[in-house]
Amino acid sequence: MDLATFQTLLTLNGQAAIAGAADLAPTEESFLACLTRLQKRFPAELAKAALETVILRNKARAKFSRAGSMYFTRPALEMASSEIVSRYRARRFAPFTRVADLCCGLGGDTIGLAAPPLQSGGGVRGGGQTFAVDIAPLHLALARANLAAYDLHANFVEADLTQTPPPQTDAYFFDPGRRVKGRRLFSVRDYRPPLSLINSWLPKPLGVKISPGVNLAELADYDCEVEFVSLDGDLKEATLWFGPLKTAARRATILNSSNPPVSLKPSTSPIPSPSLSSPLSFLYEPDPAILRAGLVTTLAGQIGAHQLDPDIAYLTSDSLVSTPFARAFVIEAAMPFSQKRLREKLRAMNVGNVTVKKRGSPLDVDDFARSLKLKGDEERILFLTHVNGKPWVLIGRIAS
């Protein structure tokens, strides 16, 4: 979709096209059939944009509470932070009156920065000025419309940040492009613009959104906090925090829609490496943000758990400790790996269906589950892992 087509979408005729597209309930599979029908009433480009808008609004409901009134392109939606993440992140900017969202895209983080305080813990910069900066006029138009969907306002600035300094504000949030023609860019040197651009902005208070799969060695020369964020158990984002926004070397933050955010950072006092143990009564599977932040040892010390293996991030304990940083499982049986012995044990337990998890095992989990050829009424979880360097299998269930 180009800028002219998007502007047409905002007209009465464009809104009628969107309404007509919604009536067709389009999907990816039915797109061409719906397009054939809709372009009998509207120009082809407008009909295509209207159908895309309806499909992308449905996809975006997982990220935005007002997705039904927003506008997207596929690449911009893939790159956009979800509303819960952007509003959490905006809290760091609470001390600053003027904040610029650099490379704002469709405005996901601009929404968080511009949002007023909420009792539920949303945006916290009520009364401040927010600037949305992007090189693409289409992105700025999308961001303007999307902020309007939330009854929010910002100052929109078209600029090439490689050629023009950012607006003079108190702090910056920078979200460089990490995709080119649908291909992910893994190195910070390849971002659009590259991460090195921030060297000309420091020591300005700065947050930078990067891929959570970043090679941490590429960040060695930056004096910053690296925060990994998971949402509902999935690792979503990483943010670099500079200057007064830095609060630790590493941080893992757990977000979900029903509980307040919780974070774990390294202890200020040395934590001994957790001891090794054979499987005990409970198994803990750390959240992926904990793993990426390198905080398994910190978590083990916090909950009094042991590692099964020095190279495996499963923890075990005789006590069930409630923690938002890991999922807990009851271990009903554990043994050195033997498919024959495992099958016999599962049949004795009347297990007919298994979910297989693995860490340190080369086996394909789906193929392995099928190969067991089980029959029974019970369900269990299998953990293929190592215990002190040797392959083991654990049988368990979710701890209540």
Image (cartoon, grey):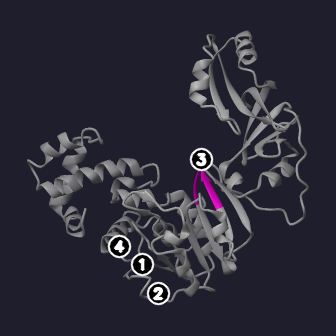
Distance between mark 3 and mark 2 Cα atoms:
35 Å
* Chain-order first, disc 4 or disc 1: 1
**Picture disc at residue 140:** 4
Secondary structure of the residue carrying tag 4 is: helix
Label 1 near label 3: C-beta < 8 Å? no
* Chain-order first, disc 4 or disc 3: 4
Instruction: Decide: few, some or many residues near mark 2? Use Cα within 10 Å; few <14, some 14-19, many ≥20.
Output: some
Q: Which residues are magenta?
A: 228-237
Which residue is denoted by mark 1 in the rendering? 133
Name the kind of residue labelled 3 in the image. Answer: Asp
* Chain-order first, disc 2 or disc 4: 4
Label 2 near label 1: C-beta < 8 Å? yes
Q: Is residue 306 above or below residue 168?
A: above
Instruction: Decide: few, some or many residues near mark 1? Use Cα within 10 Å; few <14, some 14-19, many ≥20.
Output: many
Distance between mark 3 and mark 1 Cα atoms:
30 Å
Q: Residue 128: image x %, image y %?
A: 52, 80
